[in-house]
């Protein structure tokens, strides 16, 4: 398998569809660790697909996809990863940019 960074948008979309199918299968089988792996890979592929149109901004707070009441403030960007901290814990971490959603006002 090629690196996500080397794939075309079409290849990324095909890979994302495959990862989504594998993730759904793992979810249906309640294989949570496999589900997490596939979804993490999906978000990474989606992040590469979003380039170069990425709209994530340093200093802005976003909702974290698939997490309830979790917000993330971006302090830096490096490739497809957004560095920052979770509002709930204050812990610094990096998340794929595709996991960040605009907060509806």
Image (tube, rainbow, N blue to C red):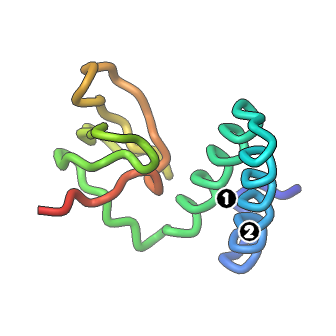
**Residue at which label 2 appears:** 17
Outermost residue, right direction?
Answer: 1
Residue that appears at 25% across and 55% down: 57
| Kind of element beneath mark 1 | helix
- Eye-nearest disc, 2 or 1: 2
Residues 98 and 82: in front is: 98
Residue that appears at 21% across and 57% down: 103
Q: Is residue 37 above or below residue 48?
A: above
Judged left or right of residue 35, residue 91 is left
From mark 2 to mark 1, how far is it between C-alphas? 17 Å
The location of residue 79, given as percent across then percent down, is 49, 50
Residue that appears at 32% across and 66% down: 55
Where residue 5 is drawn, which disc sits there?
A: 1
Image label count: 2
Q: Is residue 105 above or below residue 38?
A: below
Residues 26 and 3: in front is: 26
Q: Quadrant of residue 46?
A: bottom right
């Amino acid at each position: 398998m090629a690196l996500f960074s080397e794939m075309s948008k079409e290849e990324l979309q095909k890979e994302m569809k495959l990862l989504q199918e594998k993730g759904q299968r793992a979810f249906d089988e309640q294989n949570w660790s496999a589900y997490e792996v596939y979804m993490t890979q999906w978000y990474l592929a989606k992040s590469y697909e979003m380039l170069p149109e990425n709209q994530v901004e340093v200093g802005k707070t976003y909702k974290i996809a698939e997490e309830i009441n979790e917000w993330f403030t971006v302090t830096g960007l490096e490739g497809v990863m957004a560095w920052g901290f979770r509002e709930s814990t204050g812990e610094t971490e990096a998340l794929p940019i595709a996991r960040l959603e605009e907060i509806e006002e």
